[in-house]
Amino acid sequence: MPQKPQILSRRTVARSRLFQVEELELLFANGVRTRFERLVSSGRGAVLIVPMLDDDTVLLIREYAAGTQRYELGLPKGLVEHGEELLEAANREIMEEVGYGAHQLDYLTAMTVAPGYLSHSTHVILARDLYPERRPGDEPEDIQVVPWKLSQLDQLIALDDCTEARSIAALYMARDQLSRIS
Amino acid sequence: MPQKPQILSRRTVARSRLFQVEELELLFANGVRTRFERLVSSGRGAVLIVPMLDDDTVLLIREYAAGTQRYELGLPKGLVEHGEELLEAANREIMEEVGYGAHQLDYLTAMTVAPGYLSHSTHVILARDLYPERRPGDEPEDIQVVPWKLSQLDQLIALDDCTEARSIAALYMARDQLSRIS
């Protein structure tokens, strides 16, 4: 593994309600000095859940995405709240977004979304043995729940509104994981 | 497909050298009014390339990621430059980052990284029939090229330094696509 660059300085260069931009001045092992900007996120990260209604049926959600300004089809997810365990956060999110809790929650992996400029980390959790339970969330409108067969993952990814890299990666991972179990 | 919310207002609330944060005021079809912040990116987006040295060997790179402040193992990628076609950008990036060009470049899909708050889009391109050609890039230090077998994708994803959702999703996609061709 290469030697990490030394951080010569860091300062906040922009800030809004949601975002904090930090500028780092780095000195690489080869003597090159350079500046990078990165977005600093709250330490707790997010959970992304793969809720399986049965061995082949995953529950997706269709939700308005302000970044791309269109409805996106993907897995339920949300920020981990203060004092919450990851599996607990995962269970709360699926109760809020798909109307189910899970008797079985398995941690799969941690993913990053853009490690070059975001510190953000997302924990992927497989949820099985679901039971109906709805909790109120903070969404501005009702979320549409869309059941999909993992055996038809190719057709899902070919859709224009299923584009989020984290959801796609987690769906492949869950499909591989479940095929190993069964 | 639900009716998109109406954008009542938009304004820039923070700006740095790299980032522009925009606040949107939205009116949903159900009458709920709310504010969202999103990062606006340059219109051209990025390319992420799956460069195949042979039918099973993909060329990964290990590069310092300022966002997570550690070395990350993933696929080569970069922003599309002004006036550049997507396949042309993909070929330039692999020449700069892995030291190969490709005779065959196939467009796979477009992915988003965080559609809820980033407008950014990444185009995934499969590169085959490689030939050695190196072009100088703008990286602060030499990039380490790491060949990996797609047949050992599970072991790769289990590594602590292979975390980027776009790379993971694109590797699964390429593996599926290549298994259909062969």
Image (spheres, coloured by chain):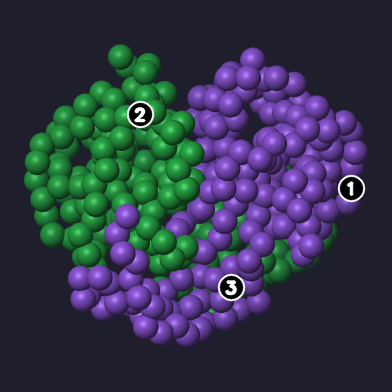
Chain colours: A purple, B green
Of residues B69 and B39, which is closer to you in this image? Answer: B69
Quarter of the image where the C terminus of chain B is located: top left
Q: Quadrant of residue B26?
A: bottom right
Relative image position of residue B67 (x, y in whole percent): 45, 65
Residue A135 is tagged as 1
User: What is the secondary structure assignment of the residue under circle 3?
Assistant: loop
Asked whether residue B79 is in view, the answer is: no
Relative image position of residue B50 (x, y in whole percent): 31, 38
Quarter of the image where the N terminus of chain B is located: top right
Q: Whole-Å distance between the Cαs marked 1 and 3?
A: 28 Å
Of residues A101 and A31, which is closer to you in this image? Answer: A31
Specify which label sits upstream in the sequence, 1 or 3.
3
The disc labelled 1 sits on which kind of residue?
Arg
User: What is the secondary structure assignment of the residue under circle 2?
Assistant: helix
The disc labelled 2 sits on which kind of residue?
Leu
Residue A117, compared with residue B182, is above or below; it is below
Residue A19, compared with residue A92, is above or below; it is below
Q: Residue at x 67, y 20 (%)?
A: A56
Residue A19 is tagged as 3
Q: Which residue is mark 2?
A: B150
Of residues A49 and A155, which is closer to you in this image? Answer: A49
